[in-house]
Amino acid sequence: MASPAKTRIWLNLLGVVLVLAVAVAAFTAVSHGNVPAPPGWLLSRAQSLAYDRNFFPSSAAYCLTTLAKAGPAVGMQPSAVGDPNEPVYLVVCSGQFSTPSYPAEEASLTTFAFVVDAHGRTVLRYDMTSRPADTRAVGRMFRLF
């Protein structure tokens, strides 16, 4: 039979192991479990839309939201929004133009954002600007690339 001191040591070690296991599980859930996977077509759509406009993104973020919430990020006025509850993806790319033939104003653009219908995959609106897109209304954005 084990002495009370050894039993106490083993119980303490078991308690430490359980606490560590719970901490690792919680960290994994927070850091990986709440990030929705983007649909496969969204990455290729973002790259082709940007490249078609001579914009070369170094990173991009996305979120699934509603048209009403995504509108301000691409300069849509509330009155221009069709069905405000329509599910859409908002994609915001950061990068730069690489074509020297553009006027200085266009060459300084660093943000390319667009809204695409989540079901039909139709681009509803896009915007290019020299300032970050206003994504406050949509909440958390997730890394696309």
Image (cartoon, rainbow, N blue to C red):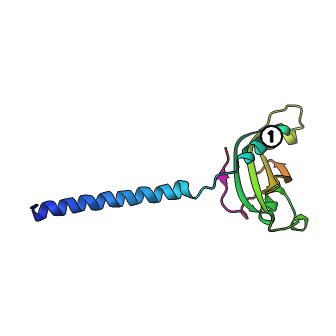
What is the total number of numbered labels drawn onto the structure image?
1
* Nearer-the-camera pick, 65 or 121: 121
- Residue 120 vs residue 80, the one in the foreground: 120
Residue stretch rendered in magenta on the structure: 138-143
Which residue type carries mark 1? Ser
User: Dot 1: within a 10 Å radius of its alpha carbon, few (fewer than 14), some, or many (20 or more) residues?
Assistant: some
The residue drawn where x is 31% and y is 57% is: 17
- Residue 132 visible in the current orientation: no
Residue plotted at (82% across, 61% down): 71
The answer to whether residue 28 is left or right of residue 143 is left
Residue 131 belongs to the span the image colors magenta: no
The structure residue drawn at horizontal position 88% and vertical position 65%, both measured from the top left corner, is: 82
Residue 107: which quarter of the image?
A: top right
Is 125 above or below relative to 85? above
On-image quarter of the N terminus: bottom left
Q: Is residue 141 left or right of residue 14?
A: right
* Picture coordinates of residue 73, whole percent (x, y): 79, 57
In terms of depth relative to the viewer, which is nearer, 23 or 119? 119
Disc 1, SS: helix
What is the quadrant of the C terminus in the image? top right
User: Does the rendering let one see residue 122?
Assistant: yes
* Residue pointed to by mark 1: 48
State left or right for residue 64 relative to residue 27: right
**Compared with residue 38, is residue 77 higher up or lower down, i.e. above or below?**
below
Question: Residue sitting at 86 percent across and 41 percent down?
Answer: 106
Is residue 141 located in the magenta-colored stretch of the structure?
yes
In the image, taking residue 126 as reference, residue 28 lies left or right, namely left
- Name the spot of residue 59 as percent of width and height, x first: 69, 43
Q: Residue 69: which quarter of the image?
A: bottom right
Residue 89 in picture, x, y percent from top left? 76, 56
Question: Magenta-highlighted stretch: main secondary structure?
Answer: loop
